[in-house]
Image: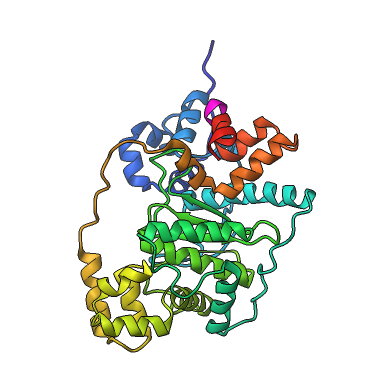
């Protein structure tokens, strides 16, 4: 049986390589066969093109189009190193996947007459940091010193997530596309994002971020929900000055996590030691330094000296060990609230197992055990 060769435009191959995040020259050096397709020396077979499509994470049919898709992330992102319409495939797919889950959940909640969370978009015109912080504390039923008696930042994150889920938010912690460890979502591109919906507001947190940063991002993204904005953040602590909305969300998150009154008192008692001041609030030393700068307790020189010192430290290597609790990880990845709705929809015959598998990425015995025994 004769092989079937495919006519493919060279620009579609280079677009697919770039889209996947690879450097074209580096990729072609490692894959000389693909280079022959671009140079017109050879044509790929169907099987070869399918293999190439898998390696660059693109649907096979996309390669056969007349021109490349004009793909843009459906929500704006504020990033540390990139601006404008920068495209990161993994971030894009994370947003699309969460949109699909949110769409199903919103329809399910609507069909079952769930109440709309009143806070979604309620503060779209508010610019008073204190008012929004007071509103968050009332909605989540948390006092200014809510984190003081907790054992760790992780415990603070868990408590805050439970509070957010109790009022109608879905919170998901992920660091890669599906279960593909080679497709990490870079923190510099995406610390988290918010997808606003009147019934199913969703918060995505990059689980590879530092614990203190995840806590801050949780609050920051909840403020976006209150303002009715779907938006993503990949920026560090120093780059939101050029966006008024991001600056406002940062200010609210900082005041919620470190109220000025408590902060000044602890700052004085602990003599401005960043790490010791951070301890009761369960935030990072950098968050304390930024708060101190905002409140005029330290100079810009001291802040940037500390910031530069921190960023110069080697990145800790995560210890490889056991895989941990599979079911606890699954609940965290998609959010306890989302899993409960999936289970209830299946039990009420409003969702087929086939569709539940597609929505969650889990299937078979592990899926059944999770929804029937481990929720």
Residue 78 in percent (x, y) is at 47, 67
Q: Is residue 183 left or right of residue 195?
A: left
Q: Is residue 38 left or right of residue 301?
A: right
Q: Work out whether residue 330 or residue 100 is closer to the camera in this orientation and state it.
A: 330
- Quadrant of the image containing the C terminus: top right
Residue 235 in percent (x, y) is at 41, 67
- Quadrant of the image containing the N terminus: top right
Q: Work out whether residue 365 or residue 40 is closer to the camera in this orientation and state it.
A: 365
Main SS of the magenta part reads helix
Q: Is residue 182 above or below residue 80?
A: above
- Residue for point 67% across, 74% down: 122
Q: Which residues are magenta?
A: 362-366
Q: Is residue 255 in the magenta section? A: no
For this orientation, the residue located farthest to the front is 149
- The quadrant where residue 203 appears: bottom right
- Residue for point 54% across, 26% down: 365
Does the image show residue 338?
A: yes
């Amino acid at each position: 049986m004769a092989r079937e060769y495919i006519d493919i435009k060279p620009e579609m191959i280079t677009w697919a390589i770039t889209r996947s995040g690879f450097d074209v020259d580096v990729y072609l050096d490692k894959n000389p066969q693909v280079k022959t397709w671009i140079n017109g020396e050879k044509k790929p077979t169907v099987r070869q093109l399918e293999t190439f499509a898998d390696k660059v994470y693109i649907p096979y049919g996309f390669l056969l189009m007349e021109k490349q898709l004009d793909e843009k992330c459906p929500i704006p992102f504020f990033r540390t190193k990139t601006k404008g319409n920068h495209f990161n495939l993994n971030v894009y797919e994370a947003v699309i996947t969460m949109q699909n889950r949110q769409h199903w959940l919103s329809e399910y909640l609507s069909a079952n007459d769930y109440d709309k969370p009143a806070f979604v978009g309620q503060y779209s015109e508010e610019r008073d940091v204190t008012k929004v912080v007071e509103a968050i504390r009332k909605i989540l039923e948390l006092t200014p010193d809510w984190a003081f008696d907790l054992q760790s930042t992780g415990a603070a994150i868990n408590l805050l997530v439970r509070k957010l889920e109790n009022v109608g938010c879905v919170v998901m912690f992920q660091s890669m596309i599906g279960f593909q460890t080679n497709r990490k979502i870079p923190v510099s591109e995406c610390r988290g994002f918010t997808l606003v919906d009147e019934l199913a507001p969703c918060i995505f947190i990059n689980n590879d971020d530092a614990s203190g940063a995840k806590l801050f991002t949780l609050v920051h993204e909840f403020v976006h929900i209150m303002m009715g904005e779907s938006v993503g953040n990949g920026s560090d602590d120093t780059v939101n000055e050029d966006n008024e909305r991001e600056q406002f969300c940062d200010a609210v998150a900082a005041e919620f996590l470190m109220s000025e009154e408590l902060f000044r008192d602890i700052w004085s008692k602990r003599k401005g030691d960043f790490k010791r001041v951070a301890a009761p609030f369960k935030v990072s030393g950098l968050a304390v330094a930024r708060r101190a700068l905002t409140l005029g307790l330290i100079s810009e020189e001291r802040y940037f000296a500390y910031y530069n010192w921190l960023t110069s430290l080697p990145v800790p290597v995560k210890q490889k060990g056991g895989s941990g609790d599979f079911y606890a990880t699954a609940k965290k990845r998609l959010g306890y609230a989302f899993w409960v709705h999936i289970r209830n929809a299946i039990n009420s015959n409003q969702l087929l197992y086939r569709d539940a598998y597609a929505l969650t990425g889990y299937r078979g015995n592990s899926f059944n055990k999770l929804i029937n025994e481990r929720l």
